[in-house]
Amino acid sequence: MAKALDTYNISSEGYGKLKLYHDKHHSLLRPYKGRQHNAKYKGKIEDFRAHSLSQLFDIAACKCLDTAKCICKKERRVPAAERNFLEDQSHGRTMMIGGVDVKMKQRLQQRNMCKNMELKRESNSWHSNRQQKPRVPV
């Protein structure tokens, strides 16, 4: 996967889910030293661990099932190359995150470089620097 999770626009609901999950985990582990030998406490930890392994929640901003009919804003969409991975993670979980996809990384860098050069050309162009003369009726 070329992009890490932090490069996606995470929806506010997804951020809230992550925060709740983190807070629950933190509150469970906070009194660990005092209760680590308590059977009931160990049971709670095992329940949390089992629940976390069985549940995967989607934090992507775009929830559209069909990318061809997606009406989300461009910055919220999940790229088509990443969509297959997200769908697999919600069902079979046979795919894994590997190393950096070098070809995709180069494409993204090239695309960003072209966009930056285009913006630079537009800001330095003759039309943008030309001052409009006030029209005087004849």
Image (spheres, rainbow, N blue to C red):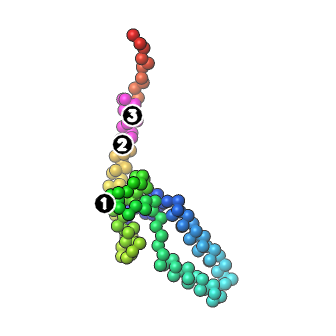
Q: For the residue labelled by badge 2, is the local secondary structure a helix, a strand or a loop?
A: helix
Which amino acid does the dot numbered 2 rest on?
A: Met
Q: Quadrant of residue 120?
A: top left
Which amino acid does the dot numbered 1 rest on?
A: Lys
Q: For the residue labelled by badge 3, is the local secondary structure a helix, a strand or a loop?
A: helix
Q: Which residue is mark 2?
A: 117
The spot of residue 24 in percent (x, y) is: 60, 73
Identify which residue is drawn at 37% across, 36% down: 122
Identify which residue is drawn at 40% across, 35% down: 123
Span of residues in magenta: 117-128
Q: For the residue labelled by badge 1, is the local secondary structure a helix, a strand or a loop?
A: helix
Distance from the alpha carbon under mark 3 to that under mark 2: 10 Å
Q: Quadrant of residue 18?
A: bottom right
Distance from the alpha carbon under mark 1 to that under mark 3: 32 Å
Q: Which residue is mark 1?
A: 103
Spot the residue most to the top.
Answer: 138
The spot of residue 46 in percent (x, y) is: 56, 84
Between 86 and 117, the one nearer to me in the picture: 86
Identify which residue is drawn at 46% across, 57% down: 9
Q: Split into 4 quadrants, where in the image is the C terminus? A: top left
Distance from the alpha carbon under mark 2 to that under mark 1: 21 Å
Q: Is residue 63 visible?
A: yes
Q: Main secondary structure of the magenta part?
A: helix
Comes first in the chain, label 3 or label 2: 2
Q: Is residue 99 visible?
A: no
Comes first in the chain, label 1 or label 3: 1
How crowded is the residue under tag 1: few (<14 C-alpha within 10 Å), some, or many (20+)? few
